[in-house]
Amino acid sequence: MAFTIRAATSSDFAATEEIERDADQRFVERFEARDWPPASSAEARAAAPGFTLVAEASSPQAEGAEILGFVQVLEVAGQAHLEQLSVRPSMGRRGIGGQLVEAAAAEAMARGYAMLTLRTYVDVPWNGPFYLRHGFVESEPATEFERSLLPIEAALGLNAYGRRVQMTRGR
């Protein structure tokens, strides 16, 4: 399937909430989780500092094309942090996630950031190994912002399902 990557517009954020919720079901099933954190609301994602890119199905009729996936990068405390990458489960393993990561890294660089960070599960195939293939390496949280993510993850209960790490791409 052909798709294009572009900046999200206000009409795209409802789809990002739905896509994240559906994609998170893979974690729920893998971990047999009883209480998984809810997807970010469309309003919260739209209001977050930074940028969101979407992968949109390319079709002859441009109006109302389907959003296949998205990546959200926060710009906080002078750094770029990949907060969320989600692809519709039915569209997985087609290169959409990889192209969204590459586009996010390119956009972060264009905005003057030398590095892009994220936090993820190290042993989940579509997490740690996926990001490793896209040039990320494990790193230690070095800034106040990066360290602030650790208690948030703990409060959400994410640590119960496996080792979480920070990964960095760039310098």
Image: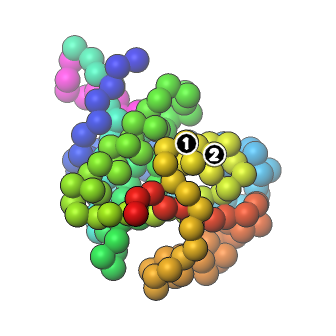
Please tell me in which quadrant of the rendered image residue 111 appears: bottom left
Compared across the picture, whether 83 is left or right of 50 comes to: right
- Name the residue furthest top: 60
Q: Quadrant of residue 170?
A: bottom left
Look at 55% across and 28% down and name the residue there. 93
Q: How many marks?
A: 2
Residue 49 x, y percent position in the rendering? 29, 68
Q: Amino acid at mark 2?
A: Pro
Q: Give how far apart the Cα atoms at labels 1 and 2 are.
A: 6 Å
Please give left or right for residue 121 compared with residue 78 in the image.
Answer: right
Crowd class of label 1 (few under 14; some 14 to 19; many from 20; radius 10 Å): few
What residue did someone put label 1 on? 133
Picture quarter with the C terminus: bottom left
- Find residue 39 and report its horizontal and vertical position in percent: 51, 56
Q: Is residue 127 magenta?
A: no
Q: Is residue 109 left or right of residue 169?
A: left
| Secondary structure category for the residue under label 2 | helix
- Three-letter residue code for mark 1: Arg
Q: Which quadrant of the figure has residue 26?
A: top right
Answer with left or right where residue 140 lies relative to residue 73: right
Instruction: Tell me which segment is drawn in magenta.
Output: 61-68
Q: Mark 1 and 2 residues: CB-CB less than 8 Å, in contact?
A: yes
State the residue lying farthest toward the front: 171
Q: Circle 2 sits on which residue?
A: 129
Q: Is any part of residue 92 visible from this angle?
A: yes
Closest to the observer: 63 or 95?
Answer: 95
Residue 45's x, y, as percent? 36, 60
